[in-house]
Amino acid sequence: MSTFLYVLSGISDLCLLILIFAWGFDFARKDRSKIKHKRHYGLWALVSLVLTVALMLMAGSGQ
């Protein structure tokens, strides 16, 4: 079970890295005034961070 939790936390960590880069590229865009809807990369990055920490603690790596 802990191996499965480690794999899930690794996947969520990879998603966290992708979301941080997407958030940075979206923030650095020149034509931000043309965006019709907000992208919530920062919020999803925080959710992924919390998920990663929770899965690692459930797997027992904090001991």
Image: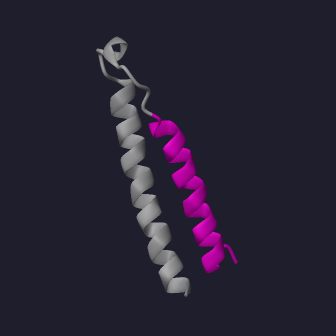
Residue at 42% x, 32% y is 39
Q: Quadrant of the N terminus?
A: bottom right
Residue at 35% x, 17% y is 32
User: Percent from the top left, x then y, of residue 35?
Assistant: 35, 19
Question: Magenta segment, principal secondary structure?
Answer: helix
Nearest the eye: 52 or 43: 43
Nearest the eye: 44 or 2: 44
Residue 31 picture quarter: top left
Magenta span includes 52: yes
- Specify the segment rendered in magenta: 40-63
Magenta span includes 41: yes
Residue 50 appears left or right of 31 = right
Residue at 39% x, 26% y is 27
User: Percent from the top left, x then y, of residue 56?
Assistant: 59, 70
Residue 14 appears left or right of 29 = right
Above or below, 50 against 32 in this view is below
